[in-house]
């Protein structure tokens, strides 16, 4: 895990050393173990190193033997131990044990297609000095981040985090207003654009080539939902064989991610995903596994009893941290700075605290991200299937006047009514298409809510912007596939990205590397070909994982429902921390930005204080305003941290 950046120009001027150092060192937290620069006519590359593999000899930038190629690289190629002897047999001479050198040798043999041979998580920039060509590449799921700006003069700026690009851009950062509908609906921008005007993210499984001021972007991989086999009879030998094969493939994915020359541990939440990795790790290592958990004092936001069950069963060396709201809010502005965008989920803050705990003992952790999107772990998948089936019957057999009457009854209920809140998510008030049943239904601010939230001028300006454009592009590719496969693919292409950025940036804020076995791409390709009932059976999520872990995990962990790492932000904002809403949500500075309708925002706050759960919406507005003050207004996160404490 490292940090990379670069600046390329067409006019062959050598980039200023001080500028490259500023870009590089703005992400020093990604690599506290070393730093390097490469400067030549028209190109500058920077690197910050977190030493994981070949600690003594893996310094970067790294050069090919003939000095033609130079690379800055972030990540791990987990099949490096098998690629190395293959390359050596072809005559390659290795100077280090680093997987970075393997990437250089792969490029020498396969050019841009080298990425297709790599199994792991990576983002890199590779400069070919003879061709004067830069290759940027990102791993298949985007576990490692990579952002860029391609300017009108042909120059290219790139980096692991957005903040690494900002020193090379003229003036203060500007809001990309067209991304507001996407952000407001989906927690975070879900496509290639960001909330920063002009700054793009390289999509997962893509390469970018820059040469002579022009760029070309190519997708080198995609996940295919072939559903290649029929569902075996329940309880049959064929079904048991599939479960056993999944266990073997999952074990291999975990084993590969144990590659490290430094201490390694596990983030243990108490859910089945992290528990399954922990139990599998226990079969692969001799020494006790180091596990780390985080929780809050409130019982509804505390999974420690389940984490302790798993730790006891695996005989791990277990450590925990309890986060108080004072610590949570004091760190929030600095963590918004680390994330570069408004923090989509409050659980990101908790992730930082457990990363900070783990960093005192290890430099690498495994985590459970990716299981929900590959194995149908969210309740919304079964809810959507239920609404689709019953809604079809409802619209087919109940006359329109009766449906309108029922909807009117629901909408006439008090806004604080739990019955109204539940019914509003069902076919009683929803249409039959996926926009209504899925995207709007589970959005932070759906289309109707955005219509109320945005002020009149902005509403008109953004009237033709589709908040679900990235989802629609994904669905278009999955036409004709089973509903569950459509939803999984759409979430893998959109929603998963923010979760991975949260994992990367919060762990890197504590200078620790995180690895995600569930997103091993051969494993996900195999899972994608399974019948949907092997993933979601009735209301049982992650069915095949639960079956594979029988006998390895305590029964309470195997059978419990997903909690989704709850954070009691809603309760905090009704109590002691209510002044934060007055300062950052309904305060004069957010009003002066001229983006949101003040009466609508005040109504949301008022309803929340009366018991309607608007915590997701208020969190989005709160962290957006903190982000705007840090990045658009240029305020230091530390000054906001003091302001938050004073507000409390």
Image (cartoon, rainbow, N blue to C red):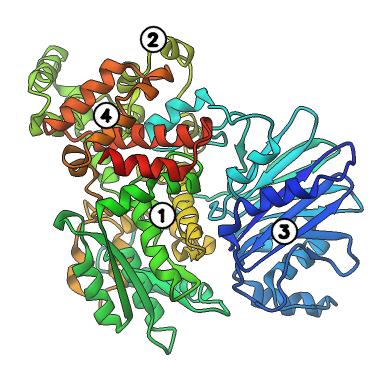
Q: Tell me if 476 is positioned left or right of 381 in this view.
A: right
- According to the picture, the residue beneath numbered tag 4 turns out to be 582
The reply to whether the C-beta atoms of the residues labelled 2 and 3 are less than 8 Å apart is no
Which residue is under mark 2?
456
N-term-proximal mark, 3 vs 1: 3
Kindly tell me whether residue 549 is visible in this rendering. Answer: yes
Viewer can see residue 482 = no
Q: Earlier in the sequence, mark 1 or mark 2?
A: 1
Residue placed under numbered mark 1 in the picture: 374
Q: Are marks 4 and 2 in contact (CB under 8 Å)?
A: no
Whichever of labels 3 and 4 marks the residue nearer the N terminus, that label is 3
Q: Does residue 290 appear to the left or right of 636 in the view shown? A: left
Secondary structure category for the residue under label 1? helix
Write down the residue under mark 3.
Answer: 72
Within 10 Å of disc 1 (Cα), the crowding (few <14, some 14-19, many 20+) is: many
Whole-number angstrom distance, CA of label 1 to CA of label 4: 40 Å
């Amino acid at each position: 895990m490292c940090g990379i950046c670069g600046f390329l120009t067409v006019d062959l001027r050598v980039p200023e050393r001080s500028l490259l150092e500023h870009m590089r060192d703005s992400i020093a937290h990604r690599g506290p173990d070393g730093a390097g620069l490469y400067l030549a006519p028209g190109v500058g590359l920077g690197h910050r190193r977190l030493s994981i593999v070949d600690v003594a000899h893996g310094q970067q930038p790294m050069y090919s033997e003939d000095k033609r190629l130079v690379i800055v690289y972030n990540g791990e190629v987990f099949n490096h131990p098998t690629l190395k002897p293959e390359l050596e047999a072809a005559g390659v001479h290795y100077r280090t044990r680093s997987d970075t050198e393997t990437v250089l040798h792969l490029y020498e043999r396969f050019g841009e297609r080298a990425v297709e041979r790599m199994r792991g998580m990576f983002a890199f920039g590779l400069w070919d000095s003879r061709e004067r060509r830069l290759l940027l590449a990102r791993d298949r799921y985007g576990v490692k981040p990579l952002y860029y700006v391609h300017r009108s003069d042909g120059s290219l700026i790139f980096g692991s985090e957005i903040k690494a690009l900002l020193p090379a851009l003229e003036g203060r950062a500007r809001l990309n207003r067209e991304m507001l509908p996407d952000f407001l609906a989906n927690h975070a921008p879900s496509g290639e654009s960001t909330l920063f005007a002009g700054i793009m993210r390289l999509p997962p499984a893509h390469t970018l080539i820059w040469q002579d001021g022009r760029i070309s972007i190519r997708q080198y991989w995609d996940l295919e939902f072939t559903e290649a086999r029929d569902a075996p009879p329940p309880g049959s030998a064929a079904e048991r064989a599939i479960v056993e094969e999944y266990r073997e493939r999952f074990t291999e994915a975990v084993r590969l991610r144990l590659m490290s020359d430094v201490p390694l541990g596990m983030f243990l939440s108490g859910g089945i995903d992290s528990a399954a990795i922990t139990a599998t790790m226990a079969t692969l290592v001799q020494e006790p596994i180091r596990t780390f958990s985080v929780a809050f004092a409130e019982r509804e936001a505390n999974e420690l009893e389940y984490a302790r069950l798993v730790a006891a069963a695996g005989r791990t060396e277990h450590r925990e941290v309890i986060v108080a709201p004072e610590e949570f809010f004091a760190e929030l502005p600095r963590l918004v700075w680390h994330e570069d965008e408004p923090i989509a989920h409050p659980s990101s803050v908790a992730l930082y605290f457990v990363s900070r705990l783990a960093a005192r003992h290890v430099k690498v952790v495994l985590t459970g991200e990716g299981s929900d999107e590959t194995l149908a772990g969210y309740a919304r998948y079964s809810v959507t299937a239920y609404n689709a089936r019953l809604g079809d019957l409802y619209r087919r057999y109940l006359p329109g006047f009766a449906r309108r009457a029922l909807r009117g009854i629901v909408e006439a209920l008090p806004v604080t009514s739990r019955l109204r809140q539940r019914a509003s998510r069902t076919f009683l008030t929803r249409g039959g298409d996926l926009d209504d049943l899925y995207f709007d239904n589970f959005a932070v601010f759906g289309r109707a809510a955005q219509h109320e939230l945005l002020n009149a001028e902005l509403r008109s300006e953004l009237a033709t912007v589709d908040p679900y454009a990235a989802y629609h592009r994904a669905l278009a590719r999955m036409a004709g596939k089973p509903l569950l496969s459509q939803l999984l693919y759409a979430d893998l292409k959109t929603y998963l990205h923010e979760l991975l950025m949260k994992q990367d940036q919060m762990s890197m804020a504590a200078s620790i590397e995180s690895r995600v076995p569930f997103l091993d791409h051969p494993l996900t390709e195999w899972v994608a070909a399974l019948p949907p009932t092997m993933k979601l059976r009735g209301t049982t999520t992650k069915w095949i994982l639960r079956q594979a872990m029988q006998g390895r995990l305590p029964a309470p962990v195997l059978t419990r429902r997903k909690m989704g790492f709850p954070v009691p932000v809603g309760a905090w904002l009704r109590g002691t921390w209510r002044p934060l809403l007055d300062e950052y949500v309904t305060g004069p500075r957010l009003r002066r930005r001229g983006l949101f309708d003040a009466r609508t925002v005040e109504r949301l706050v008022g309803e929340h204080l009366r018991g309607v759960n608007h915590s997701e919406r208020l969190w989005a507005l709160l962290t957006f305003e903190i982000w705007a003050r840090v990045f658009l207004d240029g305020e230091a996160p530390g000054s906001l941290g003091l302001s938050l404490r004073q507000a409390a």
